[in-house]
Image (tube, rainbow, N blue to C red):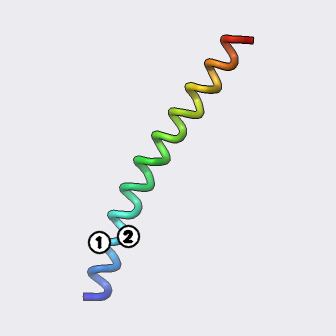
Amino acid sequence: MTVQGRTVGTKYYYSVFSETEVFVIAQALTSFYKTKLQS
């Protein structure tokens, strides 16, 4: 139970984290290019 639950929790955490990371990186790139185009 503990090992299995921990594995499921870790998989869920990593999937959510990776999705958030991709979103954050996309947002950062967008703002970066917007600033570059404005200057």
Mark number for residue 8?
1
Q: Position of residue 7 (x, y in %)?
A: 33, 75
State the residue position of label 2: 10
- Name the residue at 38% across, 70% down: 10
Asked which quadrant contains residue 8, the reply is bottom left
**Do labels 2 and 1 touch, CB within 8 Å?**
yes
Gap between marks 2 and 1 measured at Cα? 5 Å
Asked which secondary structure carries label 2, the reply is helix
- Residue 8 lies, with reference to residue 17, above or below; the image says below
Q: Position of residue 38 (x, y in %)?
A: 69, 11
Q: Residues within 10 Å of mark 2 (few under 14, many from 20)?
A: few
Q: Position of residue 15 (x, y in %)?
A: 36, 56
26 on left or right of 6:
right
Mark number for residue 36?
none
Q: Amino acid at mark 2?
A: Thr
Q: Amino acid at mark 1?
A: Val
Q: Position of residue 13 (x, y in %)?
A: 39, 63
Q: Residues within 10 Å of mark 1 (few under 14, many from 20)?
A: few
8 on left or right of 16:
left
- Name the residue at 27% across, 81% down: 4
- Name the residue at 60% across, 26% down: 31
